[in-house]
Image: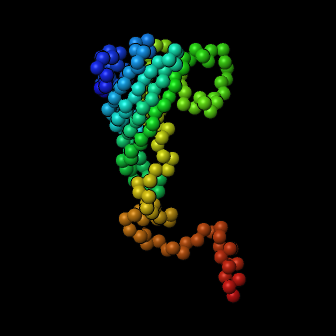
Amino acid sequence: MTLLKNTFYNCILARDLSKMKIIIPDIPQEGIDVEIQETIASDGAPFVIHARLKIEKMGSEIMVKGNLKAEVELQCSRCLKKFAGNVSVPVDVVYRPVEELKGEDHHEITSEELDSDFYAGDELDLVSLLKEQVALNIPMKPLCNDLCRGLCLNCGADLNMSACSCSQKNIDPRFKELKKLLKERKE
């Protein structure tokens, strides 16, 4: 992780991602510009992140804005092959102190609060922010290629490699009666 400003920000501990935290009282009035280029481990495969963030403090709120690019390993939803995918995300999150929720059993989130989160104590964890932003922006049905033909429904052959030898006349048993009706209609 490198800092873009000339001033040294000593509360970011580079190379130890478990400690990539911002000490909130130490954020200067002009904010902090942070550039991150790290490999982050997640529940799945580790991914490489490139992020440029501006962190500002206004009262008790912390604003994090910038851009995030991640190189992630995805699995095609049609052919099931793993492939490298890129996720590019604009980051715009407002952190509020968790103390704002004290005394509330339930808090209904409004549309204005969808890009909000809460922090406790004097630290803001950038790793969890980055992981969250990547996870929220991975496509629901990733494709290795827009023209991916997927797998044969009968034998499981990869149709991108070659045509399968299955009979294309296999019809769903639920439609056999419909086929009979169509034949009768033609006669």
Q: Residue 69 location, x and y as percent?
A: 38, 38
Q: Position of residue 81 (x, y in %)?
A: 40, 53
Is 14 situated left or right of 62 in this image?
Answer: left
Quadrant position of residue 19: top left
Q: Nearer the viewer, residue 31 or 181?
A: 31
- Picture layout, residue 73 above or below residue 24: below
Q: Residue furthest bottom?
A: 187
The one of 160 and 25 positioned closer to us in this rendering? 25
* Image point (49%, 74%), residue name: 167
Q: Residue at x 63, y 29 (%)?
A: 109
Image position of 97 with respect to 151: above or below: above
Q: Position of residue 132 (x, y in %)?
A: 47, 33
To which quarter of the image does residue 47 belong? Answer: top left
Question: Residue drawn 48% across and 46% down?
Answer: 139
The answer to whether residue 80 is left or right of residue 7 is right
The percent coordinates of residue 181 (x first, y second) are: 70, 78
Q: How is the image coloured?
A: rainbow
